[in-house]
Image: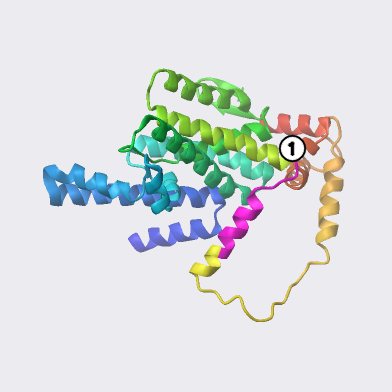
Amino acid sequence: MFESIWDDIKQQYRQGNMVTRIIIVNTAFFLMVNLVRLVLVISAGLKHNEAFDRFMEWFALSGTWWENIVYPWLIFTSMFLHEGFFHFLFNMLFLYWFGRIVGDLIGDQRILPIYLLSGIAGGLVYILYATALGLTDGIAYGASGAVMGIVMASAAVAPDYIMRLILIGDVRLKYVVLTLILLDVIAIGNLANTGGSLAHLGGVAFGWFFIHQLRAGNDMSIPVNNFLHQLLNFVSFKNEKGPRVAYRNPNLKKKKKRAKMKAHAVSDDGSGEMSHQEQLDAILDKIKQSGYESLSSEEKEFLFNASKK
């Protein structure tokens, strides 16, 4: 049974989109943390809390800036680290809901860079806060800053996208995201998890900045993906030497041209020769190539109506 489950997980990781992969990594960290705590409870008894805190310090972001420099992996591992179940659950639900929107509209290859860079931005905000107040003994962990970057990116790309909320009904995406931001602002005012809430807002700020730069023609995901690709090759000990054979599909430009022509072919009422799904696919292709702002008013209206179905 366990072998079958493990095979299913590996298959989902290989074939799933980037949101699925990030959720799997977060789940692995969550299980590891709680299994370690269980072992410590059994072995250390009443002293398990002290041992568990030392264990968490190897993965959580430190409130002391020099420790984060000495142990540079902390700013990355901290954004995959959860201890409490509901902290983990809600972060993963938000990542799934809003990450799918971002992936569909601007491309799956931009999900991980937004996640990582937003998490770094949130982590830096926390370090500045902890340093300013002298909270040298504090630690921070959780995917909230990274996830809030994804959340903000979704609203920046498609603010009028319709989300159907239980007990509330249809709500435009921009109002959902605004509510989440206000909750963090209120938490800061009430001195409730101030460092965490500031980290969330740091992620929000970077999520907006990423989309702003993307619209300006600066795709910040490219250098991140290139670095990750080189790092993966290095870790996997792949041999990059020797001649390479580059293959270019001669029909690639034709396919892109047809996709653009289909996107422009959408009529005012969403009808025409193409089916509804073909029109929707053509518009999504256009967004991935040129961004949401490249859509005509008719195409935006069609996408808005499609999101309500």
Instruction: Say above or below: 228 vs 45.
Output: below
Q: Residue at x 58, y 37 (%)?
A: 206
Instruction: Using the rendered image of the protein, determine whether residue 1 is visible from the camera's viewpoint.
Output: no
Q: Position of residue 122 (x, y in %)?
A: 49, 38
Which color mode does the image show?
A: rainbow
Q: Quadrant of residue 81?
A: top left
Please say whether residue 224 is one of the residues in the magenta stretch.
Answer: yes
Residue designated by label 1: 292
Viewer-side residue, 134 vs 92: 134
**Where the C terminus falls, by quadrant?**
top right
Specify start and end residues of the magenta stretch as a single range: 216-230
Instruction: Using the rendered image of the protein, determine whether residue 191 is visible from the camera's viewpoint.
Output: yes
Q: Residue at x 50, y 40 (%)?
A: 146
Q: Main secondary structure of the magenta part?
A: helix
Q: Residue at x 65, y 43 (%)?
A: 104
Q: Position of residue 269 (x, y in %)?
A: 83, 30
The three-letter amino acid code for the residue at tag 1 is Tyr
Q: Position of residue 3 (x, y in %)?
A: 36, 63
Viewer-side residue, 177 vs 227: 227
Please say whether residue 141 is one of the residues in the magenta stretch.
Answer: no
Circle 1 packing at 10 Å, graded few (<14), some (14-19), many (20+), is many
**Where the N terminus falls, by quadrant?**
bottom left
Q: Is residue 98 left or right of residue 34?
A: right
Viewer-side residue, 119 vs 268: 119
Q: Is residue 182 left or right of residue 101?
A: left
Q: Is residue 232 left or right of residue 143?
A: right
Viewer-side residue, 228 vs 4: 228
Instruction: Say above or below: 309 vs 254.
Output: above
